[in-house]
Image: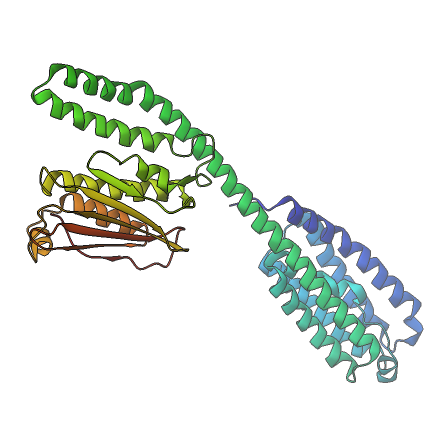
Amino acid sequence: MRAEPVVVGAMTRGLTAFRPLALAYAALMAWLHVEDMNRPAVAVAVLAGLGAWTLVTIIWRTITWPSVAVDVGLAVAGILATTWAYPRAGIVAGAMTLPSIWSASGVVAAAIKGGERWGIAAALVVALADIVEVGRVNQGTMHNIVLLLLVGSLIGLSARLARESQGFFEASVRAEEAYAERERLSRVVHDGVLQTLSYIHRRGREIGGPGVELAEMAGEQERSLRALVTVGRGIPAGRAREELGARLRALESSTVSVSLPGSPVELPAERCAELAAAVAAAVDNVYRHAGDDARAWVLLEDLGADVEITVRDNGSGMPPGRLAEAAAQGRLGVAASIRGRLSELGGSAEWSSSPGKGCCVSLRAPKELQPLARPRATGGTR
């Protein structure tokens, strides 16, 4: 069970102190106006009941929904019992209800427990009892009702905001802890796996022959893993942002051209890494399938809420239906990686191609997380 915020705990302790003080005031008012009553025993019974419940709350010191119901119920019963204790003429003249300001206890308890909505709801219940008791609403009754509504709404709002702030704080703490664990794992990976991949990359090039292919694979995995463990270094997880153009610029080579917009395109680091990985997979697809003389062009466009990346090549292209055929055969390959990444980002991946005219891959995704986004993805692999 999550601990209540300090502010809510202070409100609860304040309510515990308020009840006996309010009861003492109600008893004093009843004593001062006992001569106006025609049934003083009713006042004694009401105050005794309020006193017994007040003692229980002092010992219990916890607000629950059953205790809120008892608070409001006793307040309503005490207000309605006032019509038995006082003659009708005294009530119409403005006689104070037997619970007096103790009636606000249920309103405050409901506001602390459930926020402003429940505080207002409890205030309306007590207000209805006031109206029934007096019969004809006067200025004093309206004054009390307005005060109850203000107390219920403002204390409820304070309690709700305190809980929300507590939730944000706990989320921040969890993010900090996750970041610390990420840093620890990054050190472990750097000291072990990355160094091993770097050694394989270097030795494979030195050996030559089939070792070159192994070296390239190890180098690619080293770069991907290094990018993964270094995303957002120095910034807690979830807060880091990266410039997508810088990521894509790293793909430039003698056969790959990258075109970027004039202004930086910043995204959350994890989304930036996933988009860059999808583009890298599309470029790798060109290397593998477009032919030895093929060139590729990468175009990044900032569309405001979305980004669109187009990867176009002048290679051998694909015959119609090739993507659907490969998907039906279960050969998903690189395109599955592209499509899967874009689906998780709430975006889309689309292919267009024809034999001898190259291939065009269009990747589009929102810059920020869209919880209700419906992914749109087509195609399979080449």
The residue drawn where x is 73% and y is 50% is: 14
Tell me if residue 225 can be seen. Answer: yes
Q: Position of residue 214 (x, y in %)?
A: 13, 24
Front residue of 122/330: it is: 330
Front residue of 73/356: it is: 356
Q: Is residue 31 left or right of residue 70?
A: right
The residue drawn where x is 26% and y is 36% is: 252
Vertical arrangement, residue 190 with respect to residue 92, above or below: above
Tell me if residue 49 can be seen. Answer: no
The residue drawn where x is 35% and y is 30% is: 229
Q: How is the image coloured?
A: rainbow
Q: Is residue 104 left or right of residue 209?
A: right
Q: Position of residue 226 (x, y in %)?
A: 31, 28
Front residue of 349/56: it is: 349
Q: Is residue 345 left or right of residue 146?
A: left
Which corner quadrant of the image does residue 169 belong to? top right
The residue drawn where x is 33% and y is 40% is: 273
Front residue of 42/373: it is: 373
Which corner quadrant of the image does residue 38 belong to? bottom right
Which corner quadrant of the image does residue 250 belong to? top left
Vertical arrangement, residue 194 with respect to residue 131, above or below: above
Q: Is residue 199 left or right of residue 144?
A: left
Q: Position of residue 88 (x, y in %)?
A: 84, 84
Q: Position of residue 234 (x, y in %)?
A: 47, 30
| Tag count | 0
